[in-house]
Amino acid sequence: MNAIVVVDQNWGIGREGNLLVHLPGDLKYYKEKTIGNHIIVGRKTLESFPGGKPLPGRENIVLTRDPGYAKDGCVICHTVEDVQDAVKDYDPETVFVAGGAEIYQEFFSLCDVFYVTKINETFEADRYFPDLDEMGLKAAWESELQEEKGITYRFLKYVRENNR
């Protein structure tokens, strides 16, 4: 299973339910990686998508504690085990954990590959992703430096060495 995330220098990922910064190049990268695949998101993340609708061209699997929650075009799950059951027959390389913070935390140990957009700046954040560098994970791939709106960033791919 994969995770895909955009972080600042402190591994911040969001503030008050929003991304820290809107970078069209990162959104394009996210779409390229996830299109035709399966994304696992929490209800709040789903509702932060344009129009509060599932992202087109991919299966949107939503984990929520609300037993009455329903959303057209989504697979609704209520436990991590429900999600695991929903994706058990998929190639793990096609499954992306895509936020928010609680969802990343719930599935972190199940992910072997992390697609990280690392912004070379610090923002005021209230949600964080685990610091992969501090954990000793090494980037297996790194893009050239990107720049938008005066902000520089890179795309990185981290892979756990003890790949299951």
Image (tube, helix red, strand yellow):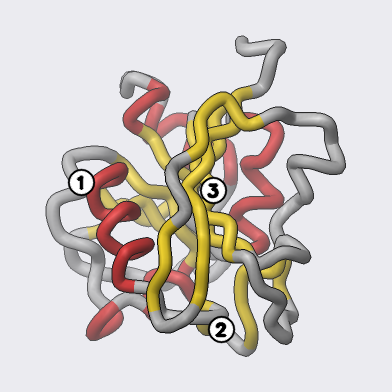
- Callout 1 amino acid: Ile
Rendered position, 129 above or below 92: below
Residue to which mark 1 is pinned: 35
- Callout 3 amino acid: Val
Rendered position, 33 above or below 22: above
Rendered position, 158 above or below 102: above
How crowded pointer 3 is (Cα within 10 Å; few <14, some 14-19, many 20+) is rated as: many
Q: Is residue 20 rendered to the left or right of residue 88? A: right
Q: Label for residue 17? A: 2
Q: Residue at x 47, y 53 (%)?
A: 145
Q: Secondary structure at mark 1?
A: loop
Q: Label for residue 116? A: 3
- Callout 2 amino acid: Gly
Q: Where on the picture, by quarter, is residue 51?
A: bottom left
Dot 1 or dot 3: first in sequence order is 1
Dot 3 or dot 2: first in sequence order is 2
Q: Residue at x 70, y 69 (%)?
A: 12
Residue 82 seen in the figure: no
- Of residues 49 and 146, the one nearer the viewer is 146
Q: Is residue 76 rendered to the left or right of residue 122? A: left
Rendered position, 147 above or below 140: below
Depth check, mark 1 against mark 3: the one in front is 3
Q: Secondary structure at mark 2?
A: loop
Q: Residue at x 62, y 12 (%)?
A: 163
Q: Contact (CB < 8 A) between labels 1 and 2?
A: no
Position of residue 127 measured from the top left corner of the image (x, y, whole percent): 71, 72
